[in-house]
Image (cartoon, rainbow, N blue to C red):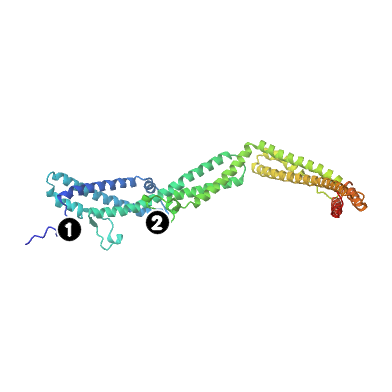
Amino acid sequence: MTAPPRNTPPVVGRPAALTRDSAAAAVAAAVAERDTIQANLLDLDGSFGKRLLAGAKLTGATKQRWDAAAADLTTLWETFTAYSAVVDQAADTLAGAGRSPARVLPELTTLLNGPSVRLARGASAVARGDLLATADANLTPAEAVREMRRAFASVADVVAAAEAVWNAIADPLQQVEADLTAARQRTTGLADGGLADALALADTNLGQLRELLNRDPLTLWLDGRDRLADPAAGIDTARIDTARLGRLREQAAAAVSRAGELAALRDHADERIAAVTAAVTAARGAWQDAAVARERAAAKIAGELPAPPDTGGLTDRLAALDALKAAGRWPRLAAELDLVEEQAAGVAQACRDAECRATELLDRRGELRGLLDAYQVKAAKAGAGEDSDLEAAYARARDLLWTAPCDLSAAAAAVTGYQQAVLALSGRGLRP
């Protein structure tokens, strides 16, 4: 029989034969690849996310996904163990050949390129859903690596997602709990049913979210069933559902703020009452100023001037503040302080406005008097000092302005009439 030519391709189904030159390199590459796989598997096995999932009593979607991932992880380690044994055997075989590697080339070829990785499959073909599945499988090292890569990606996706959710939610929950605890400590003894209810509601929601985080974290992973993040590319925190956390933070912040307000009031009640008392005193002073201005204006200006708002209600409310403090009714005291302070500010502003209106009436009368005098001078310069009609118009306006109380509207009309008469005479060419 004639020997085949040297460039004849290998028979289909047989592993490509190693040469003297490629054997050492192939073994070294296999050992390096095996070591890399082992390091990554150990990293995955010791990761926080894996320990979290393996040690928790999971429920819901997370349990379903972790059960599948845990099965993949078991298979992954079984495959790695068999694969690593083949790599070790190849390395030992090459080392045992010494200076005559040619005699072990067939064995190395079978180990590194042939179906040398033997796996015992625990599941039946029906359970695995594979018509060609058998109880055992013989894989080449390359096929074993492909299977391990697939299983690793599946497990790593679940582990990375759970860890990302935990990292995004756990610390904020811890902060919320600390804030609520501090709020409860500050408000010990404060009788406020609304605050107690708010703190209790925040506590309940905190417990529920923490329970969800511990037992079913992947529920908070958006679209987690279809597109888990690639760990190599980093975790996209925008894909974590933080809506419940946001609502909890708002509830807690409102309760903490209310607790802080009441605690501060209890600790500084005297100062707060003193400040409100000062505001009421200022309102009373504004009322007195407005009353004096109104009385002065009423004596000189005709017409009804509105009275400044009364401060009697403020006085009554102010007198009740000390009793509320003594009874420890802090929520009611806080509400009353805010109300009295607001009303005092409103009364003071209204009184200042009333004072300004009264003062403006007197200022308007003075303005009209000055305008009348100015146009009298203008008429004299125009040579109309002896005009009887003009003198009569001046006299009417002056009488209105210097009569108490002054009819300000009539006086303004008289001054305007006199002004127009002077301008008319000036327009006829009289000399100034």
Q: Quadrant of the N terminus?
A: bottom left
Q: Amino acid at mark 1?
A: Arg
Judge left or right: residue 331 versus residue 12. right
| Relative depth, front residue between 137 and 108 | 108
Circles 1 and 2 in contact, beta carbons < 8 Å:
no
| Residue linked to disc 2 | 227
Q: Nearer the viewer, residue 138 or 420?
A: 420
Q: Could you give the CA–CA distance between mark 1 and mark 2, rounded to whole angstroms?
A: 39 Å
Look at label 2 and name its amino acid.
Answer: Arg
Mark 1 neighbour class, 10 Å CA radius: few under 14, some 14 to 19, many 20 or more: few
Tell me the element at label 1: loop
Q: Is residue 216 visible?
A: no
Q: Nearer the viewer, residue 337 or 362?
A: 362
Where does label 1 land, which residue? Answer: 14
Q: Earlier in the sequence, mark 1 or mark 2?
A: 1
The spot of residue 258 in percent (x, y) is 60, 44
Q: Secondary structure at mark 2?
A: loop
